[in-house]
Image (cartoon, coloured by chain):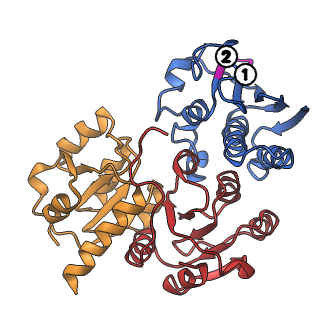
Chain colours: A red, B blue, C orange
């Protein structure tokens, strides 16, 4: 699925990365705890979270996340938006809660980037 | 091949992660394999977050050698009284502020250990903490030098 | 939707609240920040999280959640489990990631209500 379709499914707003909306993604990792993202998220996945701070972007950068979806209607500070531009990570924001985001994307075929936690 | 040192200010959450981004960029430029760059970025980032969260100040040193990447995180801070306890998944002394930022779930040191090929930690209460992380760039190149990869010394 | 059908469909392990399986699940909430869950989740939600410390029991009890589902195979801490048994809060466990658990539960609830 491409980011543009995800944007429509989630009625999302594109904060940064408008030019990357044709990027294809197949998997996602969802968490509020960034250490979990660091431990388990795989490169090229979507990161779905309810946090909207600089650490989410740094975490996504370090783990080679394809794009960030920020739920719960959280908005980003101007500094965070600027950082997103610098790191060139697309960010979508949506009013939906994480339960709704994962539910909608799952029903359209996006899958967890890991199914179970096992030995790396 | 490369040697660099980056200062990290305690308590400065706004910039936390900037050092790790720089380290990642340097390693990418050196055209090291993506998965190794990712591991190095990860362990630097968790170390950086620890310094920002708990220490007064610290630094992260990066050495790149033909067969491995060495990252050291050295801080001046409260130190860790019980390293064995601190290494347990889920153990954390993080403040609510740190938790609301998505950290402090007691996974940082576990992540560092699991993404490093060799990991050492030492700490002195009231002085600070020292982390040494080695990521091999050639498989088993360090095997004969230091046995028991991923082990913890206290 | 009845909690028991979710437990069966996702093959969840039951750690506490065996007597709560007939509870009605009206929706779901996924999140790891307790203040957010307190603020935004609803009564009858099934709460999906990876937090294991004992405060989750107080939150689930306060918000009248149908159950807590711990993801990624996380086991509740010992004092969490004691508290959950005392307060009659159901704690269930899945080996799956939060995205997978949420995706599956969402679609179960939706397929019933349609």
Q: Chain of mark 2?
A: B
Element assignment for label 2: strand
Residue A64 drawn above or below residue B99:
below
Placement of B69 over or under A116, stated as above or below: above
Check if mark 2 and mark 1 are on a common chain: yes
Number of callouts: 2
Task: Please indicate whether residue A88 sits to the left or right of residue A51 in the image.
Answer: right
Magenta highlight on residue B121:
yes
| Magenta residues (range) | B119-131
Residue of label 1? B130
Quarter of image, res C47: bottom left
Q: Which residue is mark 2?
A: B122
User: Dot 1: within a 10 Å radius of its alpha carbon, few (fewer than 14), some, or many (20 or more) residues?
Assistant: some
Horizontally, residue A12 falls left or right of residue B75, namely left
Q: Are marks 2 and 1 in contact (CB under 8 Å)?
A: yes
Badge 2 local density, few (<14 within 10 Å), some, or many (20+)?
Answer: some
Instruction: Relative to A69, say whether B70 is above or below.
Output: above
Front residue (pair A77, A47): A47
Q: Chain of mark 1?
A: B
Q: Main secondary structure of the magenta part?
A: strand
Residue at image coords 51%, 69%: A26
Picture quarter with the N terminus of chain B: top right
* Image spot of residue B135 (x, y percent): 69, 31
Q: Earlier in the sequence, mark 2 or mark 1?
A: 2
Q: CA distance from mark 2 to mark 1?
A: 5 Å
Spot occupied by residue C43 in the image (x, y as percentages of width and height): 27, 68
Q: Residue visible at 71% across and 17% down?
A: B126
């Amino acid at each position: 699925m491409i980011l543009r379709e995800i944007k429509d499914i989630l009625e999302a707003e594109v904060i940064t990365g408008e030019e990357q909306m044709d990027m294809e993604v197949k998997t996602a990792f969802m968490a509020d705890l960034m250490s979990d993202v660091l431990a388990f998220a795989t490169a090229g996945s979507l990161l779905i979270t309810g946090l909207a701070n600089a650490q989410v972007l740094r975490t996504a950068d370090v783990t080679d996340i394809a794009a960030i979806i920020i739920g719960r209607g959280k908005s980003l500070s101007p500094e965070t938006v600027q950082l997103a531009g610098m790191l060139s990570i697309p960010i979508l924001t949506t009013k939906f809660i994480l339960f709704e985001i994962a539910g909608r994307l799952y029903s359209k075929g996006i899958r967890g980037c890991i199914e179970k936690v096992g030995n790396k | 091949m490369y040697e660099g040192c980056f200062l990290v200010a305690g308590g400065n959450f706004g910039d936390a992660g900037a050092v790790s981004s720089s380290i990642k960029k340097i390693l990418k430029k050196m055209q090291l394999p993506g998965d190794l760059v990712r591991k190095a970025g990860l362990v630097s980032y968790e170390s950086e977050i620890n310094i920002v969260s708990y220490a007064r100040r610290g630094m992260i040193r990066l050495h790149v050698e033909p067969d491995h990447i060495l990252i050291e995180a050295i801080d001046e801070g409260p130190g860790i009284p019980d390293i064995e306890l601190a290494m347990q998944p889920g153990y954390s002394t993080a403040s609510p502020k740190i938790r609301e930022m998505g950290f402090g779930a007691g996974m940082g040191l576990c992540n560092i250990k699991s993404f490093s090929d060799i990991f050492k930690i030492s700490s002195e209460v009231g002085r600070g903490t020292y982390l040494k992380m080695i990521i091999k760039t050639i498989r088993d190149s360090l095997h004969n030098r230091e046995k028991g990869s991923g082990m913890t010394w206290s | 939707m009845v909690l028991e059908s979710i437990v069966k469909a996702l093959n969840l392990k039951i750690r506490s609240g065996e007597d709560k399986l007939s509870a009605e699940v009206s929706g779901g909430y996924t999140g790891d920040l307790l203040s957010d869950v307190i603020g935004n989740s609803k009564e009858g939600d099934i709460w999906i999280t990876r937090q294991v410390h004992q405060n989750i029991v107080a939150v689930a009890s306060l918000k009248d959640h149908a159950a807590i589902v711990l993801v990624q195979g996380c086991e509740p801490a010992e004092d969490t489990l004691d508290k959950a048994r005392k307060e009659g809060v159901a704690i269930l466990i899945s080996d799956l990631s939060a995205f997978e658990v949420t995706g599956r539960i969402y679609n179960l609830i939706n397929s019933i209500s349609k």
